Image: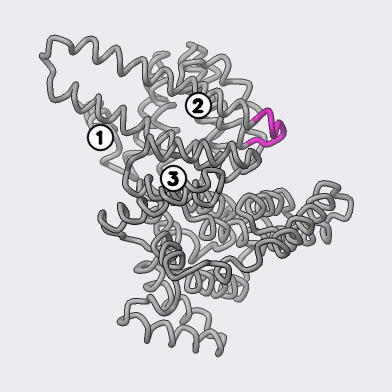
Amino acid sequence: MTEAELDPKLLNLWKKAQLAREQKNWEYVVNLALPIVKTHPLFLDARLMVRLAEGEVAKTAKKSLFGGGMSISFKSAKKDPLEAIWDLEENVFQKDPFNIKANLEFYELGMKAGQPALAALGLETIRAGHPTNTKIAHQLAEHYMANDLPEKAGEVYRHIVKHDPRDMNAIKGEKDAAARNSIKSQWQGDFRSSLKDASEQNKLELLNKQGMTREQMESLLGELSADYEADPTNITTVKNMANVLEKMEDFDQALGFYNYALTLNPGDVAMQRKIELLTDKVRDLQIAAIEADIEGRPDAPDIEERRAELAEIKRQRGMKAVEEAKQRVDRNPTDKAYRFDLGQAYFNCGMFGEAIPELQQARTNPNLRIKALLMLGKCFEKKNMNDLAINAFSDAAKDMPAMDNIKKELLYELAMVYEKVGKRDEYLECLKEIYNFDYGFKDVAKRVESSYQ
């Protein structure tokens, strides 16, 4: 959105934020611009200003953010991607704006929201805070290429070559970006200036508008359908139809058009990810509908058939997740995050033996070590390898000085294994450690208090 679309009540606040930026009063900039970001999550100018100011505040405070950028761990519980992004703004970025893990999550959430320009900010922030992290920079360049922004991609590839002159992929990428940008400039020019009439301009504005009415969406879909009939190979029209259908919550048709768009541009990495996320959403809705049906009709004559159907859908989803995770590992065999995702997918399918080697590789990444050990311990416990489970849970718990939710879960899982092998003193010690910090965690209070009776 643009400044002209700002809520009039916030316009004065925005002007004050701009003035504070000119005066380099960075903390005041953050205080002024954050409420704007909360109200208008797609006003990127305000979000960019917030991130710039947060970075300057971090430098002034002499925080060690440019080395690892992983000092804060946070995972939002919100399902709406824009709400989850606000959780990151509120709980992470004000203290640690260059946090790699949080900015990668920001990127995923932006893509899930169907906002590639917003998503790119997460990767751009990592590039600003960690200029030598060429792996993330490659991801950013690929994102720009996938979204038909070769000029920006070329700038990122030049950044990579500056820090690693021997990176042949970046050298080739810069040449490819320059070639595509030349073609784009020659044949397309500026997109807005090439729009044929006011009707086309109106379509573009509606597509970018948040909160369209059902009537507006149906009208826009009708216009796009006419464009599609005239030229079914126009990838912009195909993507726009998929976008509108998704907003109308006609997910099956939306997926059909997104998949068709991918056949028109097979190398579109962002589109591949979009399809994966929307497919997951469709599966979630399907599972939720069957679960609600089962819960609402517990005595129905076909209830066992419905339960079997639900179990089969979950099994198929699990195997599909394994297949997709395998493909990502095959494309990026040295990426430990993809190894963790594959291990998690195996675990969710009950394939504990297959999960173990993937998680063992993932734990070598310092940023994934704790999560990988937690899941490894669960795998060992499921296979009744209780001594190895105890070692995994204990190693992870020792590495976590703060009693956050992950450590509570580690200690709880460790306690359950101790109980299983008959080590009651160790079992109670783990539970009491949780009890001292969080009385309401699972059934810890009941277990601890019953031990005194």
Q: Position of residue 218 (x, y in %)?
A: 30, 52
Magenta-drawn stretch contains 334: yes
Q: Residue drawn at (37%, 67%), measured in percent from left and top?
A: 38
Q: How is the image coloured?
A: one colour
Q: Is residue 331 left or right of residue 79?
A: right
The answer to which of marks 1 and 2 sits earlier in the sequence is 2
Q: Residues within 10 Å of mark 1 (few under 14, many from 20)?
A: some
Q: Position of residue 288 (x, y in %)?
A: 27, 30
Q: Is residue 358 left or right of residue 85?
A: right
Helix, strand or loop status at disc 2: helix
Q: Is residue 269 left or right of residue 250?
A: right
The answer to which of marks 3 and 1 sits earlier in the sequence is 3
Rendered position, 192 above or below 215:
below
Helix, strand or loop status at disc 1: helix
Q: Residues within 10 Å of mark 3 (few under 14, many from 20)?
A: many
Res. 445 mark: 1
Front-most of residues 146 and 130: 146
Rendered position, 389 above or below 170:
above
The residue stretch that appears in magenta: 329-336
Residue type highlighted by circle 1: Ala
Tag 3 residue = 242
Question: Which corner quadrant of the image does residue 151 belong to?
Answer: bottom right
Q: Is residue 281 left or right of residue 401?
A: left
Tag 2 residue = 321
Q: Residue drawn at (57%, 85%), measured in percent from left and top?
A: 24
Residue type highlighted by circle 2: Ala
Q: Position of residue 426 (x, y in %)?
A: 42, 25
Q: CA distance from mark 1 to mark 2?
A: 36 Å
